[in-house]
Image (cartoon, grey):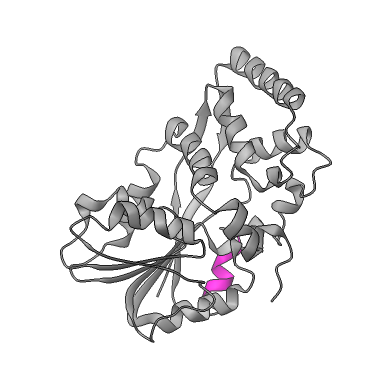
Amino acid sequence: MAASTPFQDPQFLKSEQYRDSRNLDARAELHRRFSTAVTPWHKWVFQQLNLQPSSRILECGCGPGWLWRNNLDALPPGCHITLTDLSDGMVAEAQAVLAVSDHDFQFRPADIQDLPFANDSFDVVIANHMLYHVPDRAQALAEVRRVLAENGRFYAATNGRRHMQELWQIGEGLFPDTAVPLTELRAERGIGSFQLENGMEQLTAVFPHVTRLLYEDGLEVTEADPLIAYLRSTFLMQNKTALTQEKEAQLRRKLQEQINRDGTIHITKETGLFVSW
C-alpha cells in the first residue's frame, strides 16, 4: 500500500523526520518539563506491561530506547528484549545506551509490516505511538499476531483527537499555506489513522480481546521557546523555510502575551494504551 502523506512515507520517516532522535527530543522535552501527570509516561507504560521474569519482549518503533532507559532498574531478571525501528539511526542510539546494561537487549532495524522473526517468538510486543505511521496497519497487526505467542499480549499506545489541539490551532493559524497543513496531518491519512477513537475497531479485527487504558495528563506551559521548538520538530516544518525569523518573532510575541496574561498556556493531552490478547 502506497503512503498517502509524508507522515506515512517510510523514506521520509527514515531519512528526515526520524533519522535520529532530535525531532523526537524536542517534542518529548515539552512533555517532560510541563506535564501535570502524577507518573511520567514511560514509567506508566512500563507498569502496565506487568513483565514477568524471562519474558521475551519485542518493541516495534523503539526510537532511542526511552521506555527501557527509564525503567532499567525495574526489569525482571532473565528478560530478552528485542528493539526494532524503521530508522537505523534510532536503533543505533538505543544500542549505544542499552547494549552496555546488564540486561539481554538485541537491536535491529525492522519494518513492523514485515517482521524478521519466527512465529510465536515473543510473549510481549509493544508499539508506542507509532502505528499511525504505518501505511498498511492490517498487515502490521497480522505480523504482530504472527510473532506473538498464544498467550502473549500486544500493547499499542496512541493519542486521541483532542491531543495537543491548542498547539495545532496555533500552527494552523500561523502557517495556513504550508505544504503539509496540520489539518491534513491530523486527518485519517495521518495521525487520525490510528487513534484512541478508532484503534479498538482495527485491533479487534485481529485480536479477540482488546481493552483501552487512559493516561491522565495535560501540559501547563510557562515558556514560549519549548512550544516553538515543538512546532519546529513536526512534519509541518518539512518545508524548512516556513518558520521565518519574522514568523518566529510573531509567534513568540503571541505566546508570551498569553503567558503574561494567564500565567500559563494549557495544552490538552489525550493519550492511552490498547492492550490486546
Q: Residue 67, how many percent across, how many down?
A: 36, 53
**Front-lying residue, 115 or 263:** 115
In this picture, is 113 found above or below 24? Answer: below
Residue at position x 40%, y 46% in the image: 41
Check the image and name the residue furthest to the right. 177
Q: Which residues are magenta?
A: 197-203
Check the image and name the residue furthest to the left. 77
Q: Magenta span has 39?
A: no
Q: Residue 80, how many percent across, how many down?
A: 25, 69
Q: Residue 268, how many percent across, how many down?
A: 57, 38
User: How many circles with numbers are drawn on the protein?
Assistant: 0
In this picture, is 36 found above or below 44? Answer: above
| Residue 45 appearing in the image | no
| Residue 9 appearing in the image | yes
Q: Quadrant of the C terminus?
A: bottom left
Left or right: 185 as drawn, with respect to 230: right
Q: Residue 230, how many percent across, how many down?
A: 58, 37
